[in-house]
């Protein structure tokens, strides 16, 4: 993950865009890209959206990941460690014996 993050940083720095990449603006951009991802599914079934928009969905997911990695870099967050830590927290919130096959939120289990 660090190698991927470094490639993104190099791309950004070669264009002198760091000046625009404050945590606030990166968080906004991340949210906007997630919205663009959602647009691919609007008014379609999941199957139809994937069948007709897969390439665009792939691009939008990449944009979301890029902004997430940029934001984590700016905040000094080790993304790989953050994801592993979050999975551990989710394992506590959603124990297999209570959550298996359920779509309930952990507060409803």
Image (cartoon, rainbow, N blue to C red):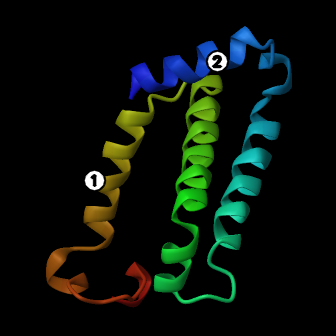
- Rendered residue at 41%/22% (across/down): 2
Viewer-closest of 58 and 10: 58
- On the picture, is 40 further left or further right than 91? right
Residue 33's place in the image compared with 76, above or below, is below
Q: Residue, x 40% and y 90% (percent of image)?
A: 108
Q: Which mark is residue 11?
A: 2
Q: For this view, does 9 lie left or right of residue 18?
A: left
Residue drawn 33% across and 70% down? 93
Residue assigned mark 1: 88
Residue 13 horizontal side relative to residue 75, left or right: right
Query: Could you give the CA–CA distance between mark 2 and mark 1, rounded to whole angstroms?
Result: 33 Å
Q: Position of residue 22 (x, y in %)?
A: 80, 29
Viewer-side residue, 68 vs 8:
8
Q: How many marks?
A: 2
Residue sitting farthest toward the right: 20
- Residue 70: x %, y % from top left: 62, 30
36 up-or-down from 102: above or below: above
Q: Residue at x 85, y 25 (%)?
A: 20
Secondary structure at badge 1 equals: helix
């Amino acid at each position: 993950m660090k190698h991927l993050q470094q490639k993104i940083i190099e791309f950004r720095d070669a264009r002198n865009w760091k000046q625009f990449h404050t945590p606030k603006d990166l968080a906004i951009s991340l949210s906007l890209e997630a919205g663009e991802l959602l647009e691919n599914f609007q008014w379609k079934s999941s199957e139809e959206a994937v069948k007709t928009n897969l390439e665009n969905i792939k691009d939008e997911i990449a944009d979301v990941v890029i902004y997430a990695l940029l934001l984590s870099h700016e905040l000094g967050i080790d993304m790989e460690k953050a994801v592993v830590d979050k999975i551990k927290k989710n394992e506590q919130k959603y124990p297999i014996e209570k959550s298996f096959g359920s779509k309930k939120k952990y507060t409803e289990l």
